[in-house]
Amino acid sequence: MWFPPALFDLPDIAPVTLPEADRPSWLFWILMGPCASGWLVAYGLAIYRAKLDKRVGIPVFVVEVNLAWEFTLSLILDQADVQRPINLSWFLVDCFILRQTLRYGWKDYPSMSRRAFRWMVFGVIAWSAVFHIMTTYELKDATGIYTGTGLNVFLSLSFIFMLSRRGSSLGQSMYVALAKGIGSFFAGWTVLVMYPGHHLFIFLFLTVWTIDATYCVLLYRKVREEGRSPWAWNRPPAEAPDAPDGLATAGSAPRQEEREPAVRSGASG
């Protein structure tokens, strides 16, 4: 049976087996420094914003998968020496985000009980840890590049989904969006310098950068639509959109209860 010839031939040597390119250490740190610090700043600002709004600043599923990635690649798996301290610093900060997720994250899943929500959180963390271990072992990915890059795409998309799901800027900040974008921008260039022949990484990071820029624009417009300044440091929490009549969920009642203490504290001030 005749088939048209393939447009692309598979390589004789799989790119995943190719070693890192030679590069001066100073170039690595010029790129990796802003990447590591950008993510740390994004985490710190997300924690701060979550305390103000009482809503998690990082999408719930991303917190779980990301925490598992940082845990396994800093404390479980044999990793590149230069990467382990960076992963561990991310993991320690992410533990604070996990605490906020357990406290506030259920508000994004109003039809789920808090008990079920906690089971979901720890279940996803456990599954993700096993997945990261198996994938890293299978690919012998000593730097966690493949799982980390794929996770970055998922993370960027999740921010847009979170903004759409909430219908407001609750828990979100332009400063978090920009810090995350800067971290991902330099992460991409770090990977491309280390693995210049890996076209998959070029495609994935172009995707990440495009999604991050889109999220910044959408969040900026949403905050302006709410009549607030996107650059206000202590911007008051946005009002959560009310559910349409007949579609109120189990989370609608607690929302009103949360507003009342805020009103009372404002009146007392």
Image (tube, helix red, strand yellow):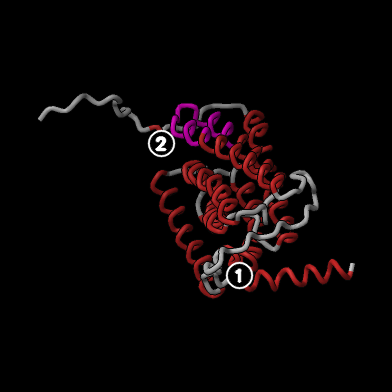
- Front residue of 83 and 130: 130
Figure label count: 2
Q: Residues within 10 Å of mark 1 (few under 14, many from 20)?
A: some
Q: Dot 1: what SS?
A: helix
Could you tell me which residue is drawn at 82 percent across and 71 percent down? 264
Q: Dot 2: what SS?
A: helix
Q: Residue 28's quadrant in the figure?
A: top right
Residue type at mark 1: give it. Ser
Q: Earlier in the sequence, mark 1 or mark 2?
A: 2
Could you tell me which residue is drawn at 70 percent across and 63 percent down? 54
Distance between the alpha carbons at the discs numbered 1 and 2:
49 Å
Q: Is residue 174 left or right of residue 247?
A: right
Q: Is residue 61 left or right of residue 173?
A: left
Q: Does the magenta run of residues contain 204?
A: yes
Residue at numbered disc 1: 252
Q: Residues within 10 Å of mark 2 (few under 14, many from 20)?
A: few
Could you tell me which residue is drawn at 59 percent across and 70 percent down? 251
Q: Position of residue 68 (x, y in %)?
A: 53, 57
Q: Is residue 230 left or right of residue 70?
A: right
Q: Position of residue 64 (x, y in %)?
A: 54, 59
Q: Does the magenta run of residues contain 140?
A: no
Specify the segment rendered in magenta.
187-206
Up the image or down, 87 lies above or below 119; here it is: above
Residue 75 can be seen, yes or no: no
Residue at numbered disc 2: 16
Q: Residue 114's quadrant in the figure?
A: bottom right
Q: Quadrant of the N terminus?
A: top left
Q: Residue 193's quadrant in the figure?
A: top right
